[in-house]
Amino acid sequence: MEVRINPVHFDISERLTAYINKKAEKTERRNQTISYIDVNLKVVKPETAMNKEAVIKVIVPHDGEFVSTKVADTFEEAVDNCFDAIERQLEKIKNKK
């Protein structure tokens, strides 16, 4: 599985990178067929409390592409919410099979 993290117009910290990779590994353990995870992070204008946006795209061969976009106070919270939504989508597909 490949994880690509794309911070838009800011430098990402080592701690945030490690956090995202840990969440991606946890998601992969639930669905071993994931081939690719793309994480886009950006700060939404104007500078307010809820201005951190995370967009996560998960590619699963033969099942398709799953996307979640969340805005939160911190990048960690936005990433958490996105991965939770992705896991629900993956679970729904798994139950249909």
Image (spheres, rainbow, N blue to C red):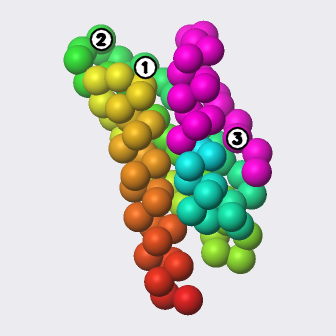
Is 42 left or right of 47, judged from the image as shown? right
Mark 3: few/some/many CA within 10 Å (<14, 14-19, 20+) = some
Q: Are marks 1 and 2 in contact (CB under 8 Å)?
A: yes
Residue 43, labelled with which disc?
Answer: 1
- Where residue 81 appears, as percent x and y from the top left, is 36, 44
Nearer mark to the viewer, of 2 and 3: 3
Q: Quadrant of residue 78?
A: top left
Q: Which residues are magenta?
A: 1-23
Residue 47, labelled with which disc?
Answer: 2
* N-terminal label among 2 and 3: 3
Q: Are marks 2 and 3 in contact (CB under 8 Å)?
A: no
On the question of residue 21 being in view, the answer is yes
For label 1, the SS is strand
* Residue 72, above or below 90: above
Q: In what quadrant of the picture does the C terminus appear? A: bottom right
Q: Amino acid at mark 1?
A: Val
Q: Look at 43% across and 20% down and name the residue there.
A: 43
Please give the residue where the numbered disc 3 appears in the rendered image. Answer: 3
Q: Quadrant of residue 10?
A: top right
* Residue 72, above or below 94: above
Mark 2: few/some/many CA within 10 Å (<14, 14-19, 20+) = few
For label 3, the SS is strand
- Where residue 51 appears, as percent x and y from the top left, is 32, 22
Q: Amino acid at mark 2?
A: Glu
How far apart marks 1 and 2 lie (CA) works out to 8 Å
